[in-house]
Structure formats: structure tokens, C-alpha cells
Amino acid sequence: MQTKQTTSEGLKRGYVITIPAADIAARIDAEIRKIAPQVRMHGFRPGKVPANLVKKMHGEQLHAQVVNDTIRDSVDQLLRTEDLRPAMQPAIALGEGYDEGKDAEITVELEVLPEIEAPSIDGLKLEKLVVPVTDEQVMEAIEGIAGQNKSYKDAAKTRKAAEGDQIVIDFVGKLDGEPFEGGAAEDAPLVLGSGTFIPGFEEQLVGVKTGEERTITVTFPEEYQAEHLAGKEATFDVTVKAVKVESETKVDDEFARNLGLDDLDMLKEIMRGQLEQQTAGLTRTQMKRALLDQLAANHDFPVPQGMVEAEFEQIWTQLQQEAAKEEDPEAALKQIEDEKDDYRAIAERRVRLGLLLSEIGQANGVEITSQEMSMLIQQAASQYRQVDRERFVQYIQSEPMAAAQLRAPLYEDKVVDFLFDKAEVTEREVTQEELQAAIEADENVEAEKEKVKAEPAKKKAPAKKAAAKKTGAKKKPADEGGAEAEAGEAPAKKAAAKEEGDKPVAKKAAPKKTAATKKPAAKKAPAKKAADRQ
């Protein structure tokens, strides 16, 4: 094998590897000798088939296999010999016109990870904004749960149902006078004015009394999920079995027991824990951004543009998806297009921070344990169908690049936690509004810094921010993690890690759907279920 370097510009490297035809032929002959004992051919005893016949039978397949294996081995040897740490998978190509019996010429192009001077982690100072949870906030949260678990009591039989009242009804839906599938229900609870049923249904039942029967006519929406009903006019024969009015929900021990808890004190304790967990997630976000700001300010080095492009593409795809959901998608898309260079600068910052965190972790012995990696694989595999999970696990175990991508977000978090422990941290109590404002201020400051770096001569007009608010297109925070990579391995695509602490209360199963119902708003379930997940 002969190697010639063709490119050495910045982090780009290029090589041509020449593999003599004799070497390839020798490897093919070795493969033939290896498989010959297993070859069966009519007229020959097992294992006695001549090598020339084995080659005639399997030569083309063996040649392709040997060439592929030789290319892989040659590139691996090149990386070891030249001590190269590829930033991403190298681009490898077999020279045109290659055929059996000729020397194989392989071109290898790649970007290498930069050499980063030992990062200084001394003198890090961080302010931790702490939001104390007050008794008033705990009670407000509990009252919110009470409001989402409304109770109703029977009204006088002479009461006419008004908006906000709950009626219990039986109904049968008909098309052209004939009942249709899914159009009937018994003892169905309906809060008038809730918008749970299709347009026009609830409005025609305002004023009904217990025991009343009424036939109403409605038209299904054109976009209704059941195609055979979409846009059709239907009648519903409705029997009102009860009219109920909302009763006051007292927040007391009995209320807590209805939620499956021992008493009100236990409910308060659970809610306090939930609120503390939510604010802890915001506090971590604020501290992480402050930490990354300090690291970015103290370190500057070239980064592989392939990694930057991959990171940018992920940011760009997400921005386009968000813009497409805005009221004026064209305006939102134009806005992000105008700021494309800014987002590319943000991508470069993320890549640099990811490499820096990786270097810090490697230098200080931060590792992902085999148990942690196993849990990561199982969690990722659970997103697939049962039949695909085993293949996914095998893929991760056999592909170092894919494994690096999977573990990168966790590795970054562990390095961040290591730096938190090393830093001098002071605490300051703030309100949740102040904490949120501090996070948003950090986002704006960093976004402006990246604009200046990307286009130092360009000055943005003040109207730009107003336009952003109008269209609703949001800039991705510049310091929300990095394009993480562990030294010597491919970078991970950015998987934006969700901050812990924003766990919603579990939802009840939705009411049984009939053709009359829209997608009903799910009600919040007892806090007991939320507590079970803590």
C-alpha cells in the first residue's frame, strides 16, 4: 500500500492510497483457500474442489468483497499511521476505470478535529438564580387542579340548561333518516359551551330540561375525520336524562383523598416538589448558558465546516418547520432567510462549544459507563416497533459513529455537571418571572454577539425585532448545547435535550368518541398519578 497526501488546508486532509493488484489477488487467493473446504460440487468429494473452479464459481463475489475489505482496512491504517481524528465519516472513492487485475487507487477526503489547547477551567464563576416555592404558589397550583376536576350536582328538574351546565344525554344520529355507525351514545356527559361536540350541537341544547326530548340538525365540518360524514347534514334524536350545575370544589383532605392521596398535606408536598422541579430546570438552563458564555469567550479555534454544516442544517430544518406553522408562513420564512448567516454563526458556536466540552471531559476523566450506555440504547430502542428493536440495538453496537451520536447529549450534560462542581457558585433568590427574563436576556445577547461575529460590518435595523414579534419566528438559542462529539469519533447530530422539571400532570383517558364529538379536551387526572412519576 502506498499513500500520498494531496490536501492539507486548515482542517481538511486529502490522500490517495494505491493498492497493488498483486495484494488484492493475494487476498482473493487467501479467501478461496478459506472457503474451498466448504464448497460442494457435483463430481468432487467434499473439500476437494480445485481452487480454479472455486474462483470461477465465486470469483466475482469474492473480488467485490475483498476490494471493500481492503479499502476499509487501508483507510483504518491511514488514520492510525497519520494519527488522524476524523470530525465526520471520511469521503472515500475508488478510482474510475478500476477493474480486476489493476492497481486500486482510493481517494480519501476528510476534516480532522482541531488540536485544542488544554482548556482552562480555573476561575469559573457562576450565579445560580434560585426561585423559592411559596405556600401561595403551592395552593394556587392545587386550586388549578381543583378547577380542572370540576364536579356537578343535579339541578332542579325545572331548570333550563344554560352554558356552563352539564347535561347527561342519550342520542342517536341519523343520515337521511337512517342511524349511522358511531352516531349513538348513552349517558353521555356534555358541558354546554365546552365546544366538545361538533359545531351547532351544543347550541341547540341550551334551554333543555331533564326528561326533555329534542331533535336537532347539524352539518359535519368539511374536514371531519370520518370521510363518510364530512360535510353531511345529520339529525340527532336527543333525550336529556339530567341537568347538572357546577358545585364548588373544596380543597381539603376529602379532595386529596379523591385524588388517591392520604390528606391535603400530602397533596401540598407533592405539588411543592413538582414546582421545585420545574424551576430547577430553568435554573439549570440559566447556569448552563452562563457557563457556555464564559467558555466561548475564553476559547477560539477553527472548527470542521462539515460539522458546522450538519449543525446548521438541523437548526435550519427546525426553523422552517416552525415558520410553516405561523399565521403568515411566507413572512416567517422570509425573515429567517434574511438571517441565515446569523444561524450559521450560531451553528459554528455550537460546534466549537461541543468540541470544547468534549476536550474538557476527556482531559478530566468524564465517562459514560457501560450501564448508562445500555440504558440509552434501550430508551432509544423503545421508540421502535418490537420487531425493529433488536436490529436497532445491533446497529448501535456495530457502528461506533451511531453510538457516539447516541451518547453525545448525555456526555455533554455530564461535563457540564463536572464544571458546575468546579465553579465558584453564588446563589441569588429571584422570582420565576425574573429567572425567565434572565434566560431570555441571555438568548438575545448571545444572538446579537453571533450577528456581530458573522457580519461585523453589517448593522441590523431596529425594525427587525419588531418583525420577529409579528411573524412569530423564533431564533434558536445560541447556547442551547453544542454539536457534541467525543474525541476521535463522529459528532452527534444535535438532539436538543429537554430540561427536566416540566412534567405535566397525567391526563385521564378521553371520553368515548362518537360521531358527534370533536377531539375532546382531555381533563387533568388526580395528582396521585403525577406523584407516581417523581
Image (cartoon, rainbow, N blue to C red):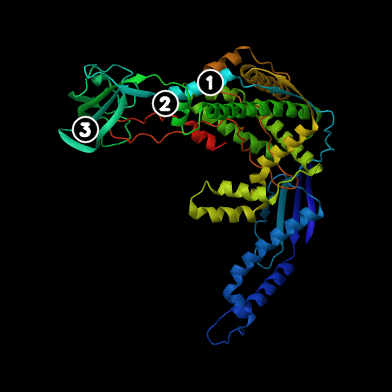
Residue at the spot x=56%, y=53% of the render? 392
Amino acid bearing label 1: Met
Quadrant for the N terminus, please. Answer: bottom right
Dot 2 or dot 1, earlier in sequence: 1
> Can residue 10 be spotted in the picture?
no
Residue 178 shown left or right of residue 469 in the figure:
left
For label 1, the SS is helix
Give the quarter of the image for residue 188: top left
Q: Do the residues labelled 1 and 3 touch (CB within 8 Å)?
A: no
For label 2, the SS is loop
Is residue 513 depicted above or below 33 in this figure? above
Residues 126 and 58: in front is 126
Q: Mark 3 sits on what residue?
A: 173
Dot 3 or dot 2, earlier in sequence: 2
Amino acid bearing label 3: Gly
Q: Which mark's residue is nearer the viewer, 3 or 2?
A: 2
For label 3, the SS is strand
Residue 165 shown left or right of residue 32 in the figure:
left
Residues 210 and 254: in front is 254
| Mark 1 vs mark 3, CA separation in Å | 44 Å
Residue 458, percent from left and from top = 69, 18
| Mark 2 vs mark 1, CA separation in Å | 15 Å
Crowd tier of the residue under label 1, counting other residues whose Cα lies within 10 Å: few below 14, some 14–19, many 20 or above: some
Residue at the spot x=76%, y=29% of the render? 296
Q: Are marks 3 and 2 in contact (CB under 8 Å)?
A: no
Crowd tier of the residue under label 2, counting other residues whose Cα lies within 10 Å: few below 14, some 14–19, many 20 or above: some
Q: Mark 1 sits on what residue?
A: 139
Give the quarter of the image for residue 459: top right
Quadrant for the C terminus, please. Answer: top right
